[in-house]
Amino acid sequence: MRPIALCLVALALAAPARAESAEELALTAELVEIPSELPPDDLYDYAYVMKYRVQGGAQGGQTLLVAHYKPRQPREKIEKAMRDRVGGKLKRFRTGDLHRLVLRRDLEKVFDGAVVDEYFAADRKTPRYWCKQVDPA
Amino acid sequence: MARTRTIALTAGFLGLIFAPPVGQAIVELREGERPVIAELFAGAPAEAHLRQLEKSLDEASSLGSHLRPWYQVLKHRLTGDLGHKALRGREGWLFYQPDVKYLLEPYFRGQGPLPEGDPVAVIRDFKEQLASRGIDLLVVPVPGKPSVLPDRVSAALERTSEVNGNTRRFLSELREAGVETVDLQAAFRSRREAAGDDGALYLRTDTHWTGEGAVLAARRLAERVRRYSWYEGAAGERRYRTREASVMRRGDIVTMSGVPSAIETIPEELVRCRQVVDADGGLYRDLPESPVLLLGDSFSRIYQSDEPRAAGLIANLAYELQLPLASIVNDGGASTLVRQQLARRTQLLEGKRLVIWAFVERDVRFGLQGWKPVALWPEEPQPHDPTPAPGSPKLASP
C-alpha cells in the first residue's frame, strides 16, 4: 500500500513540473543575428524577433527565433506592468553574446502587441518564442 | 610655467575626450559585460559600422543616462522644450513631430526609390487577395491632429488651411487603383467648422482623438458599411446601447518626451466617452465570427482596450451597426505588422464579408516596418507582384 501511495504523491508532484516544461524552456544560446536596426520604442511598445543558436544540451546547434520585448531597454528597466512577462539582468543585445534564456512557447498568448519579425516573409513555420528572462551567460 | 600650463591643458583636453569611454569600459567590465567600444574592432572601419558604433556608445553611456534627465529638465524649464519628438503648438496644444513632418514633406512618390515599400501597391495587392475569397476591403486613413487643427500648430496657419494634400493624393491614388476608401478628414473638418472652436475632436497633449472623435469616425464609417448589400441580413436585432463614461488621461506626447518636469506639471485631461454595453449591461465584446473584421492601430485601441474600455472606435462602430465586430489592433504597426498578424490567423477571415483597415495618415510615410507585401495564403498563387517598378507612378485598376 505504502509504495502505491508514494507513487501517487510522486505523480502529483511531477504533474505541475510537466505543465511548466510544456510552456517554458530554459537554455543557453548565442545571439547570432539582430536582423535590422531596432526601431524606436518611445511611442510604441513592441517585441522584436532575433535569431539564436543553442549551445550544448540535446538541442545544441539548433536555431531559435526569439521575441524580446523592447530590446532597446535594459531588462531591469522594463515597466512594472510587463515585469511578470519580461525579466533578467541583460543590459543590451549584441550579436555574438551568450545568453541564458527562459523562453515561452505561447508568444501570442503572452503578448498581443506589435511583433517586429524580419523573418516573417522567408520563414513562417519556425516557431517564435517569447523571452521571459534573459541573463548574460 | 607656460610649459606646465600647456601640459595641464593638453592633459585636461585628452581627459575630457577619453574619460567617458574609458570610464564606460570600466563600468561595463565591472558588470561582467563586453565593453561596447570593443565593437570598434569587430568590423571593417566602414561608415555604416562606425555610425552603428556611435549609436551603441550613445545608448550604452552610463554618464549620458545619468546626465540626460537633468539636462532635459533644465532645457524644459528654460525654454519649454519637450525634446525632438514633441512640438509645442499654441494655447497649450502639443503635437507629435512625425504627424507634422508627414504634412510638410513632399508626397512619397516621385522622390526616388521607395525603400519602405509602396503603400498603394501593397494595399491593392491586399484588396485582391481578400477579393479572391469574396471579401471587400475598406481603407480608412485617420487624420492626425495637425491635419484638422493646423491653426493650433502655428499662428501662420488658418483654421481652414489645407495642409493634408498628401493624404488627399493618397486617397485619390487608392480610388484610382480600385480600392474603396472612407475620407474622415472631410467629416472632421466639417465638425470643427460647425462647432466653431476645436470641435473637441483631439486631445490637447496626446496624439489621439477624444471619445467624441472616435464616435464621429464610427458614424462616418457606419454610413458606408450600411450600404453593402449583405448588411441588412447581418445586422439583426438591436443588441447594444450606450452610456456615458469618462477617464483621466495623461497625454502620450508628454510621456514620450521623458522630461520629468513636464510629466509633473502638464495636467492629465478629462475625456468623456460613449461606452457601449450589451442588453445585459456587459461591456461590448468582439465576436471573431462577425462578418466584419477591423484592422487598426492605437486609434482603434484608445478607450477600447484602454480605460474606460468598450468606448473606442470598435465598440462605437459596432453600436452604430448594431453588429459585433472582429478586430486585430496593432499599435503603430497598422502598415505591415497587423497584416502579418492576420496572416498568422487567417482562420479569422472565414465567413468575413468586409475588412476595414484603419491607420493614422502619417503611417503612409512612417509606419513601423514600412509597407511590406504580405501573402495571406502563401501556398496559393498571388494575384500579382505588389512591388512596383522603381519610380513608377502607374497604377492600373484591376
Image (spheres, coloured by chain):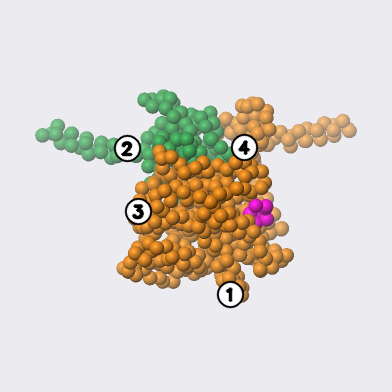
Chain colours: A green, B orange
Q: Secondary structure at mark 3?
A: loop
Q: Nearer the viewer, residue B80 or B359?
A: B359
Q: Between marks 2 and 1, how big is the CA–CA gap?
A: 58 Å
Q: Earlier in the sequence, mark 1 or mark 4?
A: 4
Q: Between marks 1 and 4, how big is the CA–CA gap?
A: 49 Å
Q: Chain of mark 1?
A: B
Callout 1 touching callout 4 (CB < 8 Å): no
What range is drawn magenta here? B100-107
Mark 2 Cα-neighbour bin, 10 Å: few <14, some 14–19, many ≥20: few
Callout 3 touching callout 1 (CB < 8 Å): no
For marks 1 and 4, give the one nearer the viewer.
Answer: 1
Label 1 sits on residue = B195
Q: Nearer the viewer, residue B139 or B83?
A: B139
Do badges 2 and 1 share one subunit?
A: no
Label 2 sits on residue = A22
**The disc labelled 1 sits on which kind of residue?**
Ala
Q: Earlier in the sequence, mark 4 or mark 3?
A: 4
Do badges 4 and 2 share one subunit?
A: no
> Residue, x 54% and y 56% (percent of image)?
B175
